[in-house]
Amino acid sequence: MKLGARSGSFIVAGAVLVAAGLVYSASEHVYKADMSAAQARVSTLQTYRIAQSIKSLVYGYQLTINEYYSTVLEYQDYQGKVLQQKEAIDKEMAALEKLETGDATAVGDLKSALQEIEGLRLELESALARPDKNWDLAREALFKLNVVSIRAVQPADRIARIAGENTEKMSETWEGQQSQALAVLRIVLPLLVLTGVFAAFTGFRIKQVEPTEEGEQVAA
């Protein structure tokens, strides 16, 4: 009887270890799913925000240069404003490239367009900085700058759209991990119930055996 009770105890202990392992595995799946979901939300929101911010900044940058060409702004006021906008654009671009969550081609196109805008801005300024202002050259540079500014917005839109698509993919991954965790838990719960029942039965058997063994010792 001792052997039977001990065997039952070993079986219960083994079942508990298996159940604990399955619970740990399910917890890992849930943890990974939560981490993936959190990272997806953060990176997507940042990428989308930066893309929209760059679009807004490009429009403002373009407007400021047009105002300078139209003599709405004096050169000193224009220079302070346009350099501040350029600094903001550069900062957002650095943050976007650091994230590495957008489409590499779209980010490259956006960066190239911004560099072209900067070159045209300097060309326009040079044309208007002369004692005899070269309005023809400035007008041509401004026309090209306006065209490139519109072109710069397109990859920014593409980056925002791709960020949304990445979110959907990450959500699918998250749902898959959650499904795996639920599948494991469906196995664990019945096992835990059986383990509890078996543990109770084994405890009951041990209690029955102990008085019998004491009686045998007294008789001896």
Image (cartoon, grey):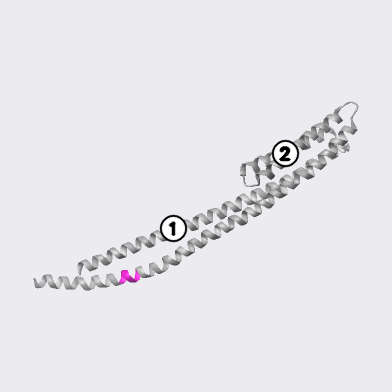
Which residue is denoted by mark 2 in the rendering?
112
Q: Main secondary structure of the magenta part?
A: helix
Image mark count: 2
The image's mark for residue 117 is: none
Residue at 48 percent of width and 64 percent of height: 182
Question: Which kind of residue does numbered mark 1 sit on?
Answer: Ser
In which quarter of the view is residue 146 placed?
top right
Answer yes or no: is residue 59 visible.
Answer: no
| Mark 2 secondary-structure assignment | helix
Left or right of 116? Residue 181 is: left
Image coordinates for residue 216, horizontal then vertical, percent = 13, 72
- Specify start and end residues of the magenta stretch as a single range: 196-200
Which residue is denoted by mark 1 in the rendering?
25
Q: Nearer the viewer, residue 138 or 214?
A: 138
Question: Which kind of residue does numbered mark 2 sit on?
Answer: Ser
Mark 2 surroundings within 10 Å by alpha-carbon count, few (fewer than 14), some (14 through 19), many (20 or more): some
